[in-house]
Image: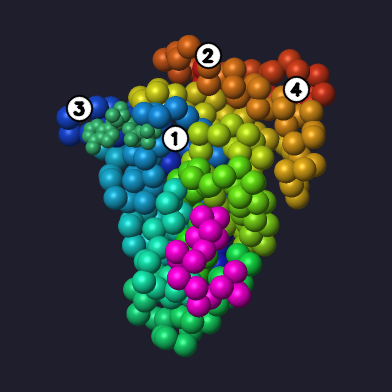
Amino acid sequence: MHQQQMAHLKIDHIDFAYENGQTVFNDFSLDVQPGEFVALLGPSGCGKSTLLNLLSGFLQPQRGSIRVNANSVRPEMRELGYVFQSPQLFPWLNALDNVGFGLRMRADVGAVEREEKARNALALVGLADVANRLPHQLSGGMQQRISLARTLAMEPTLLLMDEPFAALDAISRQNMNEELLRLWSSLKQTVVFITHDIDEAVFLADRVVVLGKAPLGVQRTLPIALPRPRNHRDTRRLPQFHEYSSSLMDTISAPPTSHASPAQIAVPALAASHSSLLFESTL
Ligand code: ADP
C-alpha cells in the first residue's frame, strides 16, 4: 500500500437535529489526531449512527464543520473507509472478488491492478489461501476479515468502524482485535471505532470518548496509556487495564448530567500509580 498523508479528523462545534426536531448534537467537537485510535463508547440512542452519517458526509450539520485534513467530508472522499457490524459480502462472489468489488468503482484502477490490490489486502488479513471460496464456506470471523480487507484495499486513511466485531464469538472477537491493532500499527490509519464494549474500547484505543444520551455529547474523554503492542493475554493482566475499565463503567452507570463545563478529574486509583494521568471530562 503506498504512502498517503495521514488523516486528521476535526469535528468543530457541530449542531445537528433531525427534521422532527430531535436534537442529537449541540456544540459537539472532537479532534482525532493523524494516526490516533479513538473508541467511541455510549448507550444506544446517544447518536453513534448519526455521528457516522455525519462523518461520512451523508448528513450535514446545521452548524459547525467536519473536516479531514482541512477538507469538508463528502461521501465519495477517498480518505474514508467503513467497516460495519455485518460483513455485507456478496454471496455469489468469491473472497477475492468481494475484496476487489469496491475498487471497481475506481476508474483509475484497471483489472490487473484491482486483482493485485485485492490479493494484497487478502494477504494482509491472513486469508490469501481462501481467495476462491464463497462467503458461505467461511466462518463469521473470516467473513469479517474479508470485509475488512475490502475496505483496506481502497487504501483509506480514516477508518470508520461501527461495532465491526459485535456479532462474533468472544474468541474470534479477541483475535480480530489483535489483528486490527497489527494492521493499524503498520498501515497508520486514523481510526474511529464505535463499540458498546468497555474492555474492547480500552484494549484498542489511544483514547476512549464516552458519549451520553443525545444531545448530551461528550461525557468524558479518557486517554489510555497502556503499552503497545498489545495482546489480550498480557494486556488484560495489567492492573491498569482493569482500572480503566472500571472507571469507565462508573462513568457509564452514573446518572446522566447535562452540565457541560470542562473539568480535569483525576481518578484516585489510577492517579496513585500514574500521577500524570488526568482525565479530561465534561461531566
Ligand atoms: P445510536 O446509534 O447511538 O443508537 P442514533 O444516532 O441512531 O443513536 O440516534 C440518536 C437520536 O436520534 C435518538 O434519540 C434517535 O431516536 C434519534 N433519531 C435517529 N434517527 C432519526 C431520524 N431519522 N429521525 C428522527 N430522529 C432520529
Q: Which of the marked residues, 2 or 1, is nearer the chain's N terminus?
A: 1
Q: Which residue matches tag 2?
A: 254
Q: Is 53 located above or below residue 241 in the figure? A: below
- Element type at mark 3: loop
Q: Amino acid at mark 4?
A: Leu
The x, y position of residue 165, in whole percent, is 52, 47
Separation of residues labelled 1 and 4 (CA atoms): 26 Å
Residue drawn at the location 61% of the way across and 50% of the way down: 172
Q: Residues within 10 Å of mark 3 (few under 14, many from 20)?
A: few
Which of pointers 2 and 1 indicates the residue nearer the eye? 2
Q: Which residue matches tag 4?
A: 270
Q: Residue pushed farthest right?
A: 273
Which of pointers 1 and 4 indicates the residue nearer the eye? 4
Q: Which of the marked residues, 4 or 3, is nearer the chain's N terminus?
A: 3
- Element type at mark 2: loop
The span shown in magenta is 127-143
Please check the rendered image and state whether residue 141 is part of the magenta-colored stretch, yes or no: yes
**Residue 244 in view, yes or no:** yes
Q: Amino acid at mark 3?
A: Gly
Which of pointers 1 and 3 indicates the residue nearer the eye? 3
| Picture quadrant where residue 251 is located | top right
Q: Badges 2 and 1: C-beta atoms under 8 Å apart?
A: no
Separation of residues labelled 4 and 3 (CA atoms): 41 Å
Q: Which residue matches tag 1?
A: 29
Q: Is 167 located above or below residue 122 in the figure? A: above
Left or right, residue 217 beside residue 132:
left
Which of pointers 4 and 2 indicates the residue nearer the eye? 2
Q: Badges 2 and 3: C-beta atoms under 8 Å apart?
A: no
